[in-house]
């Protein structure tokens, strides 16, 4: 009998601190698998965000740096420019990237920095207790929008992929989801492709991964996956928005 | 012939694996692990087809698949 699925080398063996059913764990594993398959673990450098994934440096089995809130793309820029032979990636949530870090991500993308950004969007602030994020859906109840997000006063969810793909410099921008096995495989492909682009020096790459937050959404993990599929995907359409080969959308 | 193994101490009992198994052979055990969760387990190993859906969806890398 041959092992067909096992623990990736680029993931440390310690258990993660994420809540039961949180899809951060799946996304961590996909990133680790992509790094393994491209055999770049020994020259990979992760930049961790502020948010639930702040301890990502404890989980990725490669060098890592933790950045101030939202500043991961700026820190990654510095690392990549100082050490251009390393594979530098950031791992950021929607509170980190789409709110306080919006300036950093837009300018890193606009400069076409040769880094990879893994953007985990779960439409809520997780670590701080379920507050409304820039990506919260209209009408979605959070601790700071108890009657549902009111678009008249708080606007609409920011579609980061669509916005960044109006820029000229980015090389690869895609949005994927991890709500079922088929989409997990597609997410893995997109993440691997983004890293491949960086290995080949093609420029800025970003993969947005739609994710769940069962704890702060107030659902079981399985209900949360269904909610993602039924509510988040219509608001955040999946697809490749920018690619040097083809654009499928 | 396929086989899945569960590292029960890592399991947080989220039941995502149970929901995606096409053969519906994954169940939550009656016992607790040291974290206080009921771990997922498979008793009817002979029905496993080795599709690895459970392992791909597991957020805690609990599951290994052999074929």
Image: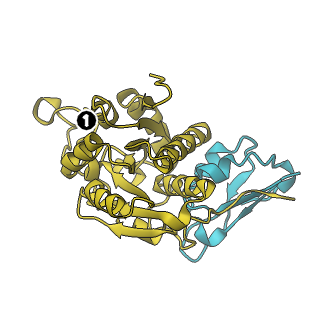
Q: Position of residue A102 (x, y in %)?
A: 21, 46
Q: Which chain is represented by yellow in the image?
A: A
What residue do we see at 26% from left, 60% from top?
A: A128
- Residue that carries the numbered disc 1 in the rendered image: A158
> What color is chain B drawn in?
cyan
Q: Nearer the viewer, residue A102 or A132?
A: A102
Image point 32% across, 58% down: which residue? A81
Crowding at label 1, few (<14), some or many (≥20) Cα neighbours within 10 Å?
some
The picture places residue A190, in percent across and down from the top left corner, at 52, 40
Front residue of A167/A233: it is A167
**On screen, residue B8 above or below A85:** below
Disc 1: host chain: A
Q: Relative to residue B8, is residue A160 drawn left or right?
A: left
* Image-based side of A208 in relation to A77, left or right: right
Q: Up-down: is A65 above or below A229?
A: below
Q: Is residue A153 above or below residue A78?
A: above
Residue A248 screen position, x and y as percent: 48, 23
Residue at the left extreme of this rendering: A153
């Amino acid at each position: 009998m041959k092992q067909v699925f096992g623990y990736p080398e680029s993931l440390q063996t310690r258990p993660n601190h994420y809540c039961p059913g949180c899809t951060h764990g799946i996304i961590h594993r996909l990133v680790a698998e992509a790094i393994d398959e491209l055999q770049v673990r020994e020259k990979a450098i992760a930049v961790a965000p502020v948010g639930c994934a702040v301890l990502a440096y404890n989980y990725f089995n490669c060098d890592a740096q933790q950045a101030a809130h939202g500043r991961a793309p700026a820190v990654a820029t510095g690392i990549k420019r100082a050490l251009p032979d390393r594979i530098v990636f950031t791992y950021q949530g929607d509170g980190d990237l789409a709110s306080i870090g919006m300036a950093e991500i837009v300018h890193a993308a606009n400069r076409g920095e040769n880094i990879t950004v893994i953007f985990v969007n779960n439409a809520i602030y997780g670590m701080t207790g379920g507050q409304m994020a820039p990506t919260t859906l209209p009408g979605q109840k959070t601790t700071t929008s108890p009657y549902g997000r009111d678009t008249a006063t708080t606007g609409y969810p920011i579609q980061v992929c669509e916005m960044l793909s109006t820029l000229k410099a980015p090389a690869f921008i895609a949005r994927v989801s991890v709500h079922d096995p088929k989409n997990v495989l597609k997410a893995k492909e997109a993440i691997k492709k983004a890293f491949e682009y960086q290995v080949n020096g093609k420029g800025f790459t970003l993969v947005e991964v739609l994710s769940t937050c069962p704890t702060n959404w107030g659902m079981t993990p399985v209900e949360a996956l269904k909610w993602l599929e039924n509510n988040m995907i219509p608001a955040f359409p999946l697809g490749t928005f920018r690619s040097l080969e083809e654009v499928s959308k | 012939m396929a086989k899945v193994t569960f590292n029960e101490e890592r399991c947080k009992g989220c039941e995502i694996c149970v929901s995606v198994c096409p053969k519906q052979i994954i169940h939550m055990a009656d016992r607790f692990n040291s974290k206080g969760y009921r771990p997922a387990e498979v008793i009817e190993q002979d029905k496993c087809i080795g599709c690895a859906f459970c392992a791909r969806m597991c957020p805690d890398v609990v599951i290994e698949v052999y074929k």
